[in-house]
Amino acid sequence: MTTTDIAKAGGSLAIRPDQISWTDDQAAVLRQSGISDDVTAAELAGFLHLCQRTQLDPFSRQIYLIGRKDKRANRVVFTPQTGIDGYRVIAHRVIAETRETFGYEDTLWCDSNGQWRDVWLADAAPSAAKVTVLRNGQRFSAVALYREYVQTDWNGNPTRMWKNMGANQIAKCAEALALRKAFPHDLAGVYTAEEMAQADNPSADERHLRKVEPGQGDPWATPTPGRDFLTEAETAPNIEAVRQIWGEAKQAGMPDPVLNGIVEIGKLKAAPEAEPTAAPQPDDEGLVDGEVVTTPEDDYADAVAELRAAAEAAHLDDFDNGVTGALGMPLADAPVDAIRALAAQIRPAA
């Protein structure tokens, strides 16, 4: 697909080669796809330039602008992202235009003892993968270490895709690194979903390191200056007040240890007075009189359920292949925002 092809396709959403800013129609669809008002004008301008340079279409789910909370910047920072297939499309297009030669050497995986293998049969994930790209007779090799790229859950364990297909996932990361070496001008500034998966790993201070005891502050919490939500919850007169404090803490972006601490306090205040010794026991659901504190796993499951419901309502067949094609990556690798955006696009047709 050439730049001219992109300009011909997509109607009002088509990206023109001479375009210097997003049109109103394009901006509306970008917002629907999950790009919030936190995005800066510079990030949007850079994304437009990247779409034009790579000839990947954001409205066909070939490239995304993914937002992630950056504590140093104290805001959501948006980064362009594609799937490994997007990298391959760009590489093959460049080779077709330049009439160069292109290929790969066999992918290699390394075990914990430093032994390289051309096929990975062990149940445990490899320690590293190596991919070598051949462009016009030159070798471009890259090694990706599993520990540097693995995506983990809030308990520090590999997520489902990285647990079940660790060798495949780390090989994609190594391939992306090698392709970026071989095609630096064409792939600079855009990263694959496999490479960026680890960016969504909960940091040490975001993980639920321990249960917060009722009436005790959390040493890992980062309270908003001038406001101690835990103390407010402890001194609240009833469960309704605790519920309101929890909502305000959530809106203020407080970390999960603080939110869970308010949950535990709410459980005590919701306990029947007739049984003062029967204090509620902590559970894994995080309930406060009907309020549910969701985890990233819950959020992902809810987003997938929304997408399945939208697909069924629209009578769409072949869900797995259709979703993979629309997202540009396997469903298990897709960010929650991208899954919800796809559900929103399908839903009006239902």
Image (spheres, rainbow, N blue to C red):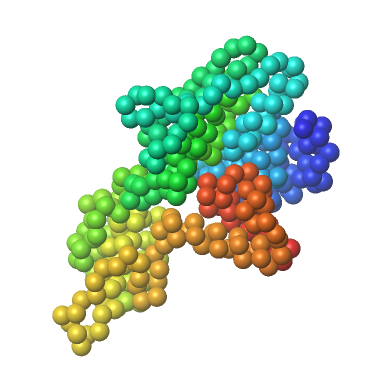
> What residue sits 71% from the left and 65% below the top?
315
* Residue lying furthest left: 277
Q: Position of residue 5 (x, y in %)?
A: 81, 35
- 111 to the left or right of 332: left
Q: Position of residue 251 (x, y in %)?
A: 43, 60
- 127 to the left or right of 77: left
* Residue lying furthest bottom: 274
Q: Position of residue 19 (x, y in %)?
A: 76, 34
Give the quadrant of residue 213. Answer: bottom left
Residue toward you, 292 or 137: 137
Residue toward you, 98 or 30: 98
Question: What is the total number of numbered labels drawn onto the structure image?
Answer: 0
Q: Position of residue 336 (x, y in %)?
A: 53, 53
Residue toward you, 20 or 154: 154
Quadrant of the drawing holding the N terminus: top right
> What residue sits 20% from the left and 88% below the top?
274
- 48 to the left or right of 2: left
Specify whether residue 66 is in view.
yes
Quadrant of the drawing holding the C terminus: bottom right
Specify whether residue 181 is in view.
no
Say if 129 sits above or below 81 in the image: above
Say if 282 sits above or below 205 in the image: below
Say if 200 sits above or below 283 in the image: above
> What residue sits 76% from the left and 45% below the top?
13
* Residue lying furthest right: 8
Residue toward you, 225 or 9: 9
> What residue sits 29% from the left and 68% below the top?
283
* Residue lying furthest top: 137
